[in-house]
Image (spheres, grey):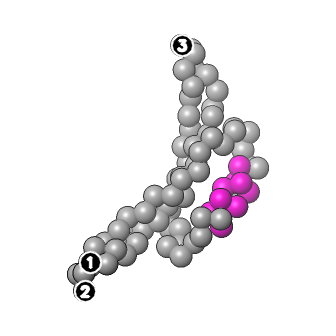
Amino acid sequence: MVEQIITKSKLRLVYDAGMGELGEMIEKTKTYNNVKAEASAEGLFAVAQALNNLTTYSMIEVGRENDYELVSN
C-alpha cells in the first residue's frame, strides 16, 4: 500500500487587475508559502478573505497547491 504525505502547501490568490489595452482581463497572482499541511479549507478561505481586505483588486480565485511524497508501507 502507498501513502500520500503532504510535504509542502501553498495558498494562491488570483486578483482581477483590470483590463489590458486589447480588452483582455489582467490577472495578478499572489502565492503564500509555508502553509501548514493541517490547515483546513475553511481556515485558508478565511485568511484569503482577510488578505483580500488589504488590496484594491477584486479576488477572483482562491486555491491551494500541495506537493506530495509517496511512501510505500
Q: Mark 3 and mark 2: span between their CA atoms?
A: 54 Å
**40 shown above or below 60:** below
Q: Position of residue 12 (x, y in %)?
A: 54, 52
- Residue lying farthest bottom? 73
User: Label 2, label 1: how many angstroms apart (C-alpha)?
Assistant: 6 Å
Q: Of circles 3 and 1, which is in front?
A: 1
Residue 5 within the segment the image draws in magenta: no
Residue 5 lies in quadrant: bottom left
Q: Nearer the viewer, residue 55 or 36?
A: 36
* Residue position for label 1: 2
Percent from the top left, x then y, of residue 68?
35, 68
Pointer 3 or 1: first along the chain: 1
**Residue 22, labelled with which disc?**
3
On the image, numbered disc 2 is attached to which residue? 73
Q: Locate residue 57, reporting x and y percent.
A: 69, 38
Q: Residue furthest top?
A: 22
